[in-house]
Image: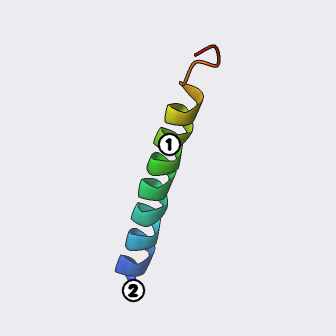
């Protein structure tokens, strides 16, 4: 079942990319606004 590990890895990569993007979006907001 090679596809299971492939889909799992792909899902983790996508989730990490989304969380990383959201993290940078949240922390890119200036505090003095």
Q: In the current view of this chain or complex, which residue is farthest to the right?
A: 31
Above or below, 17 relative to 32? below
Closer to us: 27 or 11: 27
Q: Residue at x 59, y 29 (%)?
A: 27
Q: Which residue is mark 2?
A: 1
Above or below, 3 relative to 22? below
- Looking at the image, tell me whether mark 2 or mark 1 is earlier in sequence order: 2
Q: Which residue is mark 1?
A: 22
Left or right, 23 with respect to 10, comes to right
Q: Quadrant of residue 13?
A: bottom left
For mark 2, give the secondary structure.
Answer: loop
Q: Quadrant of the C terminus?
A: top right
Assess whether mark 1 and mark 2 are in contact (beta carbons under 8 angstroms): no
Above or below, 28 relative to 19? above
- Give the colour scheme shown: rainbow
Q: Residue at x 45, y 47 (%)?
A: 17
Q: Quadrant of the N terminus?
A: bottom left
Locate residue 24, reporting x and y percent: 53, 32
Q: Quadrant of residue 8?
A: bottom left
Q: Mark 1 packing: few (<14 Cα in 10 Å), some, or many (20+)?
A: few
Q: Mark 2 packing: few (<14 Cα in 10 Å), some, or many (20+)?
A: few
Q: Residue at x 40, y 62 (%)?
A: 10
For mark 1, give the secondary structure.
Answer: helix
Q: Quadrant of residue 3?
A: bottom left
Closer to us: 27 or 1: 27
Residue 13, disc: none
Q: In the current view of this chain or complex, which residue is farthest to the top?
A: 32
């Amino acid at each position: 079942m090679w596809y299971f590990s492939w889909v799992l890895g792909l899902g983790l990569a996508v989730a990490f990319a989304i969380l990383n993007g959201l993290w940078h979006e949240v922390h890119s907001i200036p505090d003095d606004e």
